[in-house]
Image (tube, helix red, strand yellow):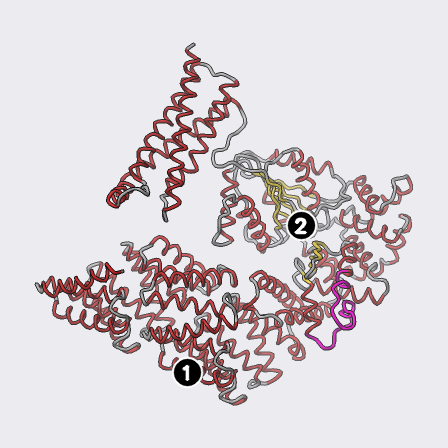
């Protein structure tokens, strides 16, 4: 009877806890729907309570099925009542802390205060509940076995590519060895790691796929994921896919690093078993330490395939040295579509022995035999008759062997022989074989992981005299996509291509890295050089035919990957070029440099521009317009990098050359004039900048018209100049003209349009129109992230500006997040001493000062000041801005003498650079007034405040926040002076506007 009473009490307590938890969760969710910033502890509780409810519900159900002893029930009841006490206290605290929609304003204010005072109590409850949750979990596991979720319920995932060949022969011993190897891994190793190591073509990928299939069937793992580990980029892409699959809330991520971190942390906490396959980890040198990508966790397993010996250190290694004879024979007969009899078995064993038991070689040999309807006894004859050709490439094969790290006992010659046999099946005749073979080999000199039809289609469109191999893809001189698809399908049938996707718009395919290497190695050095040059020309035509500003980011990154591949081949096969080579490559160098520059790959861009410049100077002379175009672009690159002196030298050289060759009003001349204006603005030479912009504007309006995009670029930059000069009305007029024109000519999402949108945001912020400013910044940020990516410098500029806006709105946490993102991105893209980096450093200093972190603020200001003085000079406006901020900081620290010295330096510099009525000058005047007041120099303070007030009213208007700040300061001063009537009048003015706003 006592046990029955205990059971009733336990059930009642669980039911009460479930009801109260539901009430608390509803209240918290209601709060989330209206609150902008939710305390972390409430978020933790929202995750925690459903888990405890789930555990208690399971416990109650188990108790019904299998009653506990009286002692066990009493112990469990004690824990449940403890949970009940905590949830009851939490319910009461929430009522006191969280506002309701029906609460009066005074009551809401009291709750805000209570939420601050009581948050520590809520944290204590959350921690106590977490302890009870752990106790309940242990009880469940010990009593009933199995496991129970303590972080979130994991779903079942099976994300494996459809790459398994239909004729796969199960390699039983190796599959068993993988499983036993996982079992051999010591328990303190998290996760368990097994490496499949062997040369290319040993069937490592197929073996891993089969293991995944078997593991799925046997429910060995609850989740299985697949990552292409051939490069850091493909690994990142794999993590992106996994993050999208397992993030049930559809969350957004800032960057790829956050996706990787999310996946690693999620899997680390999983209670269920999981497996990740890292396939084709063949180039460890590109990764650093690939283990940093491995999620930790006791329930995790990792299977890695590699042909590089360096991967042995990562885990228990299984060396894949070839198929067992019976397995190889089975594979050959299946692919050959021949029956198993004694004759075929005897001849088949000879073939697989000759092919070194290599699965890929056996597979391809079977395809060759099937295509030719060849009896097995004749295969050796075919092989021997082509042996002379194979042996002619022996040194190259040894070179390839060394690149793989080489297993000297492996008969890798047979792999290349098999591919050569497949190659000989291409086309219906020798002419077709030559043309298609050229196309296939050329593909190996591009990014072989993703080759699209448009690469070749664009090349045909850009040439008046297509080469013979391209005519294989044309009908009556026009591109024929069906002929192209037929060729791709034929090569796929011979196992020379993989990853084929024949779509309605364009077809795509990839080459296995081993096939790519073989295609390069089967031609001599002169041939490789010709293919390298041809691939670069094809890619140049593809890039030049497209407006980079209108392309989706995915296409831009596709271009970059091909440029990277071309330049890697260039490095290997074209170390030194004759003058004649520059004729075909200087255009490529120019195009590739521009593409790199647009994606902030500045070092690579500079190398390409220098190469193009050398080629043009050598072939055409230093004053040719093509040479000058490269000089001009080098200037723009240097300006992007903050190398302003080098940029000015390039622009001046280009301008002199253009004026001589083309005249002062030619558009190329005017482009350089415009860019010189931007450079002078960056140097703080505002008068010179305005002269350049006005010249460019007049010339472009005359030559191109008032709505041409080049004209609008100058209009936009004139707006920025006017804003820097404090001419806000004129600036807004320029921005609005530029925005209207760009939206009409280019569309609302073009990068030039977004640049003006960002500038309008800056202007609105300067005018105190913070809501309008935020709308502009958010539009610019969304557009830039879509068009350029989250780490592009234009994106980071807007991120920095959003940080400034959030700081002005008092959202200091959001501001710091923006600044840190901008700083990390700028340091990575531009370097720690670039002016854009230093601007963000200065802004972080202001934020730290606002947060009362004065030591951190001073460190930021000193770093910004040192960098600006070095990069821009001691009198540049950016330098003076940091000087002014240091003055404010010293004043806050009570270092009044140091503060006055900073303010006087800033004031003198701003008056010289910007004029006595510029808003930056007036800001320093106001700060000097505050300092004089603190020093008791009331007359001097009043003079400063009066000057600042008069200037702000004129420049910004009577209702701008800067004007009102000065009004407030003047009112305080009058009160300190005993001028109560003046103080009352000034405060009345301040409060009147505040009520209106």
* Residue 164 falls in image quadrant: top right
- Report the quarter where the C terminus lies: bottom left
* As drawn, 152 above or below 312: above
Please provide the residue range marked out in magenta. 462-485
- Residues 919 and 600: in front is 919
* As drawn, 489 above or below 914: above
Q: Tell whether 434 sits left or right of 318.
A: right
Q: CA distance from mark 1 to mark 2?
A: 62 Å
Labelled disc at residue 694:
1
User: Are there few (<14), some (14-19), or many (20+) residues within 10 Å of tag 1?
Assistant: some
Residue 405 in picture, x, y percent from top left = 67, 53
* As drawn, 297 above or below 542: above
- Residues 978 and 373: in front is 978
Per the image, label 2 sits on a secondary structure element best described as: loop
Q: Residue at x 48, y 83 (%)?
A: 700
Q: Which residue matches tag 2?
A: 307
- Residues 86 and 468: in front is 86
Q: Tell whether 362 sits left or right of 847.
A: right
């Amino acid at each position: 009877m006592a046990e029955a009473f205990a059971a009733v009490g336990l059930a009642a307590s669980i039911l009460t806890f479930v009801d109260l938890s539901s009430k608390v969760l509803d209240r918290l969710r209601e709060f989330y729907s209206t609150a902008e910033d939710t305390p972390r502890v409430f978020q933790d509780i929202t995750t925690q309570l459903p888990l405890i409810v789930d555990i208690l519900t399971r416990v109650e159900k188990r108790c019904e099925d299998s009653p506990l002893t009286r002692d066990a029930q009493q112990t469990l009841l004690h824990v449940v009542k403890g949970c009940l006490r905590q949830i009851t206290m939490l319910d009461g605290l929430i009522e006191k802390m969280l506002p309701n929609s029906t609460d009066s304003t005074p009551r809401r204010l009291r709750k805000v205060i209570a939420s601050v005072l009581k948050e520590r109590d809520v944290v204590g409850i959350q921690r106590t509940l977490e302890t009870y949750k752990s106790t309940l979990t242990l009880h469940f596991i010990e009593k009933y076995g199995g496991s129970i979720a303590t972080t979130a319920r994991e779903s079942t995932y099976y994300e494996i590519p459809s790459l398994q060949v239909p004729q796969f022969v199960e390699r039983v011993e190796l599959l068993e060895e993988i499983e036993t190897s996982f079992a051999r891994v010591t328990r303190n190793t998290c996760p368990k790691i097994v490496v499949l190591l062997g040369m290319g073509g040993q069937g490592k990928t197929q073996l891993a796929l089969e293991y995944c299939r078997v593991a799925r069937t046997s429910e060995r793992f609850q989740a299985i994921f697949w990552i292409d580990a051939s490069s850091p980029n493909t690994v990142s892409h794999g993590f992106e896919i996994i993050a999208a699959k397992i993030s049930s809330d559809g969350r957004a991520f800032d960057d790829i690093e956050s996706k990787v971190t999310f996946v690693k942390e999620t899997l680390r906490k999983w209670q269920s078993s999981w497996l990740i396959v890292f396939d084709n980890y063949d180039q460890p040198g590109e990764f650093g330490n690939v283990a940093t990508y491995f999620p930790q966790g006791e329930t995790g397993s990792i299977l890695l395939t590699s042909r590089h010996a360096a991967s042995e250190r990562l885990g228990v290694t299984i060396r894949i040295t070839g198929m067992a004879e019976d397995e190889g024979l089975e594979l050959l007969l299946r692919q050959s579509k021949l029956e198993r009899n004694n004759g075929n078995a005897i001849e088949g064993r000879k073939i697989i022995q000759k092919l070194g038991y290599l699965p890929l070689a056996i597979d391809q040999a079977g395809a060759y035999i099937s295509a030719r309807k060849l009896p097995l006894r004749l295969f050796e004859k075919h092989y021997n008759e082509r042996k002379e050709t194979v042996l002619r490439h022996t040194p190259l094969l040894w070179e390839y062997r060394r690149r793989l790290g080489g297993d000297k006992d492996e008969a890798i010659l047979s792999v290349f022989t098999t591919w050569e046999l497949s190659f000989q099946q291409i086309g219906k005749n020798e002419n077709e074989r030559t043309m298609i073979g050229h196309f296939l080999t050329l593909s190996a000199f591009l990014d072989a992981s993703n080759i699209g039809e448009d690469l070749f289609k664009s090349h045909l469109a850009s040439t008046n005299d297509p080469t013979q191999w391209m005519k294989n893809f044309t009908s009556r001189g026009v591109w024929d996509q069906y002929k192209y698809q037929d060729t791709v399908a034929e090569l796929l049938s011979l196992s020379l291509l993989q990853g084929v996707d024949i779509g309605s718009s364009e077809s795509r395919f990839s080459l296995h890295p081993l096939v790519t290497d073989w295609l390069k190695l089967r031609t001599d050095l002169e041939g490789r050089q010709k293919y390298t040059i041809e691939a670069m020309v094809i890619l140049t035509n593809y890039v030049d035919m497209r407006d980079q500003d209108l392309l989706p980011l995915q296409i831009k990154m596709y271009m970059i990957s091909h440029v990277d591949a071309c330049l890697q081949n260039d490095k290997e096969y074209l170390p030194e070029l004759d003058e004649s080579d520059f004729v075909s490559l200087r255009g490529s160098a120019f195009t590739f440099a521009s593409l790199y520059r647009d994606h902030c790959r500045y070092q690579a861009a500079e190398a390409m521009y220098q190469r193009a410049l050398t080629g043009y100077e050598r072939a055409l002379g230093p004053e040719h317009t093509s040479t000058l175009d490269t000089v001009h672009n080098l200037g723009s690159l240097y300006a992007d990098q903050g190398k302003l002196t080098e940029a000015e030298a390039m622009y001046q050289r280009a301008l002199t050359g253009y004026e001589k060759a083309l005249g002062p009003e030619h558009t190329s001349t005017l482009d350089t004039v415009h860019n010189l204006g931007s450079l002078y603005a960056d140097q703080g030479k505002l008068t010179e900048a305005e002269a350049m912009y006005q010249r460019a504007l007049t010339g472009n309006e005359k030559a191109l018209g008032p709505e041409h995009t080049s004209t609008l670029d100058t209009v936009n930059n004139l707006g920025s100049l006017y804003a820097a000069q404090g001419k806000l009305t004129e600036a807004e007029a320029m921005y609005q003209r530029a925005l209207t024109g760009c939206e009409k000519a280019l569309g609302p999402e073009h990068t030039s349009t977004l640049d003006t949108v960002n500038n309008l945001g800056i202007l609105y912020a300067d005018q105190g129109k913070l809501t309008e400013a935020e709308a502009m910044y958010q539009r610019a940020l969304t557009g830039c992230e879509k068009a350029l990516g989250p780490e592009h410098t234009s994106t980071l500029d807007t991120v920095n500006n959003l940080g400034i806006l959030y700081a002005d709105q008092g959202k200091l946490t959001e501001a710091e997040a923006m600044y840190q993102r901008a700083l990390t991105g700028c340091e990575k893209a531009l370097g720690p001493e670039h002016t854009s980096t230093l601007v963000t450093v200065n802004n972080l200093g202001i934020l730290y000062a606002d947060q009362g972190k004065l030591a951190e603020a001073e460190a930021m200001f000193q770093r910004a000041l040192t960098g600006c003085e070095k990069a821009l000079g001691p009198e540049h406006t950016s330098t003076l801005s940091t000087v002014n901020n240091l003055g404010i900081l010293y004043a806050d620290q009570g270092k009044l003498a140091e503060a006055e010295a900073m303010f006087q330096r800033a004031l003198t510099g701003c008056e010289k650079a910007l004029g006595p009525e510029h808003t930056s000058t007036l800001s320093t005047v106001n700060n000097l007034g505050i300092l004089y007041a603190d020093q008791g120099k009331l007359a001097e303070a009043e003079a400063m405040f009066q000057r600042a007030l008069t200037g702000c009213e004129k420049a910004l208007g009577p209702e701008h926040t800067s004007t009102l700040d000065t009004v407030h300061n003047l009112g305080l001063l009058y009160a300190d002076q005993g001028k109560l009537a003046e103080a009352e009048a000034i405060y009345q003015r301040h409060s009147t506007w505040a009520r209106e706003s």
